[in-house]
Image (cartoon, helix red, strand yellow):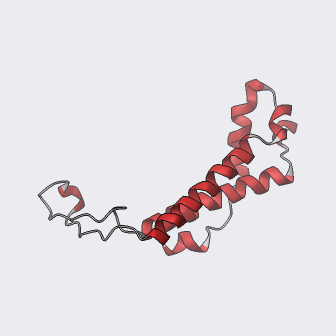
């Protein structure tokens, strides 16, 4: 690993938390009804037949909406913290993108969080 990819421990932790937050968010969304607002479903062939029959959606509860909003807020803040980390000021502009991609690969969690496994 080159000096440009010797990431500070706190930056690696932030990126790993960001990976996990995204995985938890995707897993949570997968368990929710398909429509945020109550909506009538449809039978195969009426529209979007590639999906088969789609049941009515009761919509999301206020608690589910708040949870999704909270999760998005956490993802946004972690993204800001990673991008604004002081480490990036020491990286030459011509390798900045490659270095950020290396951080994403290097900080990827070895195991998926429990929430993602349930999805």
Q: How many marks?
A: 0
> Residue 79: x percent and y percent?
67, 47
> Residue 61: x percent and y percent?
42, 71
In the picture, the quarter occupied by the N terminus is top right
In which quadrant of the rendered view does residue 86 lie? Answer: top right
Query: In the image, what residue occupies the spot 62% across and 60% down?
Result: 21
Pick out the residue farthest to the top.
Answer: 94
Query: In the image, what residue occupies the spot 15% across and 62% down?
Result: 44
Query: In the image, what residue occupies the spot 45% across and 69% down?
Result: 62
Seen in the picture, residue 96 relative to 101 is either above or below; the reply is above
88 vs 67, nearest the viewer = 67
Taking the image as shown, residue 116 lies to the left or right of residue 82, namely: left
> Residue 6: x percent and y percent?
85, 44
Taking the image as shown, residue 45 lies to the left or right of residue 14, namely: left
21 vs 97, nearest the viewer = 21
2 vs 70, nearest the viewer = 70
């Amino acid at each position: 690993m080159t000096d440009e990819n010797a990431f500070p421990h706190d930056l690696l932790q932030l990126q790993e938390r960001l990976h996990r937050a995204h995985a938890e968010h995707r897993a949570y969304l997968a368990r929710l009804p398909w429509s945020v607002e109550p909506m009538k479903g449809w039978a195969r062939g009426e529209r979007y037949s590639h999906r088969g029959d789609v049941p009515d959606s009761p919509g999301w509860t206020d608690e589910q909406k708040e949870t999704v909003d909270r999760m998005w807020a956490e993802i946004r803040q972690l993204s800001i913290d990673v991008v604004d980390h002081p480490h990036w000021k020491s990286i030459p502009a011509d390798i900045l993108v490659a270095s950020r991609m290396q951080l994403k690969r290097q900080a990827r969690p070895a195991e998926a969080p429990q929430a993602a496994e349930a999805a």
